[in-house]
Amino acid sequence: MGLFGSKEKPEDLMYDGMSLMDKGQPKAAIALFNKVLKQDSKNIEALYNKGLALNQIKKYTDSVTCFDKLLEINPNDAQAFNNKGIAMAEMGNIQDASECYDKAIESDPKYAASYFNKGVLLDKLQEHEEALTTLEKAISADPRKPNAMVYKGIVLGKMKRHEEALNCFQNICKKYPNNQDAFFQKGVQLAELGKHEKALDVFDEILKKFKDNVNVIYAKSRSKAALEMYPESLELLKQAVSKNPKIIRTWAKEEPIFTKLHGNDQFKKLVKL
């Protein structure tokens, strides 16, 4: 080492920063990306990954600033627009987020992530038909990833197009047999179609691997109630409430299947009816 030390090499700092990101330590990674940017304020890789890390720790305003700096250097960076859009959406700036996704798509019409994020945004705005169209574009842009297919099925379910949604999830399960989200949603759609015995087979299979999953426990309780297996349904509902009281109680109060239990003392006590 020289008398006055030496600068840490940017490539070494970036490597260590990315390693920290992989280990789920974004805050520590930001410190290293900052060291790179102190040496070179226009280092695109450091700016981009710092923006990602800031999104992960929910510092969305700082993230937007970071991506803006990157876009000053490279005005057509689709990934920067996309991740700036994510930050904007998290802050509730829906119009700005949508514009960011549009700019990302304009910069790279084959960038699937922007179509997916815009589809999610449209769904949240209750613009389901537009969401489906955009999600189809995400699937076409990258047919190897199942995330847009899964979300498409969820949107179809929200639109009460349950047969189409079930078909969508069944196709995903054939193509990606380990995709638990699609498998669970397959069970949900079977239940929506009144096929509760088949739905229970799905939920039981998932619970073999994920016995504490509150969503699956609640869904199983719901199907048991639909089949008038009330003692089992109430026991499952009790488990679900113990894991997430606020959400499960809200769901149970609004669920038509549980209407017949509204006079049951155990049910009333569980959901605080």
Image: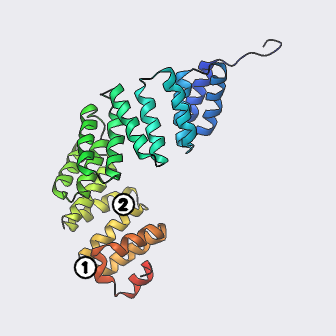
Q: x, y percentage for residue 195? A: 18, 66
Q: Quadrant of the C terminus?
A: bottom left
Residue bearing mark 1:
228
Q: Is residue 23 visible?
A: no
* Other-residue count near label 1 (Cα within 10 Å), few / some / many at <14 / 14–19 / ≥20: some
195 on left or right of 64: left
Q: Quadrant of the N terminus?
A: top right
Q: Image quarter for residue 160? A: bottom left
- The residue sitting at the front extreme is 95
Q: Is residue 117 visible?
A: yes
Mark 2 and mark 1 in contact? Answer it, CB < 8 Å.
Answer: no
* Along the line of sight, the residue nearer the viewer: 225 or 62: 62
Location of residue 119 with respect to 114 vertically, above or below: below
Tag 2: residue type? Answer: Leu
Location of residue 3 with respect to 102 vertically, above or below: above
* Along the line of sight, the residue nearer the viewer: 124 or 263: 124
Q: Image quarter for residue 42? A: top right
Task: Residue at 44%, 62% (x, y): give it.
Answer: 212
Task: Residue at 37%, 78% (x, y): give it.
Answer: 234
Task: Residue at 48%, 71% (x, y): give it.
Answer: 242
* Along the line of sight, the residue nearer the viewer: 35 or 86: 86
Q: x, y percentage for residue 69? A: 54, 27
Task: Residue at 57%, 24% (x, y): give it.
Answer: 15
Location of residue 152 with respect to 229 vertically, above or below: above
- The residue sitting at the top extreme is 2
**Sequence-wise first label, 2 or 1:** 2
Residue bearing mark 2:
207
SS category of the residue bearing label 1: loop
| Mark 2 and mark 1: Cα distance apart in space | 21 Å
Tag 1: residue type? Answer: Glu
